[in-house]
Amino acid sequence: MKEPDQLGALLPSRVIADIERIHMPYLGYHLLREHLTRTLLGESEPPILHWLGKEMGRQIPIRSANGLVFPFIRLGLGKLDLLEDGERQLRYRLTHTIYRYMSPERINRSLSLECGIIAGAVGRWKQQETEARMEAEETGSVLITVRW
């Protein structure tokens, strides 16, 4: 039996299939993340993006701590590596080539979306309320810790 598409709750499957075949520059996406969200959301950007990410994450079914690796790649959100799979927490490292063009302040503000997606998906999987914290590293990657 074919597994349902993990992203099927976010977009119709036919749309996903068509869009994944399109090769477009990343510049437009970066512009939206850098300018549009900052302008529209202002100081409320991090909590709103985190909340939105958590809502999105709750719609992505996972069955393991590594269950978000492929969806993150498909969505262009970066490379997600599981660093720790503990009894009450998970630790990930998120990397993306675009981070080198972002200031540490922008990383901490705009990556609240990715942090929320991880928290929401893990919360659904664990069937518990989760809390996710993000820490930017000097290497241009981000550590994300999820606790429940």
Image: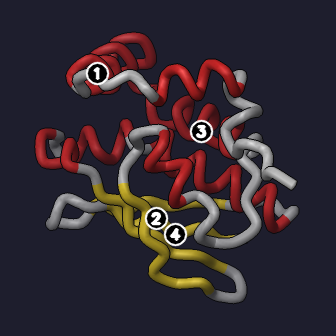
Please tell me whether residue 109 is drawn above or below residue 143 in the rendered image.
above
- Of badges 4 and 1, nearer the viewer stands 1
- Of helix, strand and loop, which one carries label 1? loop
* Position of 2 relative to 39 (above/below): below
Q: Is residue 83 left or right of residue 139?
A: right
Proximity of marks 2 and 4: CB atoms separated by less than 8 Å: yes
User: Going from the N terminus, do you reach mark 3 or mark 1 first?
Assistant: 1
Label 3 crowd (10 A; few <14 / some 14-19 / many >=20): many
Residue 8 screen position, x and y as percent: 73, 34
Q: CA distance from mark 2 to mark 3?
A: 14 Å
Q: Which residue in the structure is indicated by mark 4?
A: 145
**Amino acid type at image mark 3:** Gly
Per the image, the residue denoted by label 3 is 53
Q: Residue at x 57, y 60 (%)?
A: 132
Label 1 is placed on what type of residue?
Met
Which residue type does callout 2 highlight?
A: Ile
Residue 127, quarter of picture: bottom right
The answer for how far apart the CA atoms under marks 2 and 4 are is: 4 Å
Q: Position of residue 30 (x, y in %)?
A: 26, 26
Residue at the image position 43 percent from the left and 70 percent from the top: 81
Locate the N terminus by quadrant. Answer: bottom right
Q: In this rendering, is residue 117 above or below 130?
A: above
Cα gap from disc 3 to disc 1, whole angstroms: 23 Å
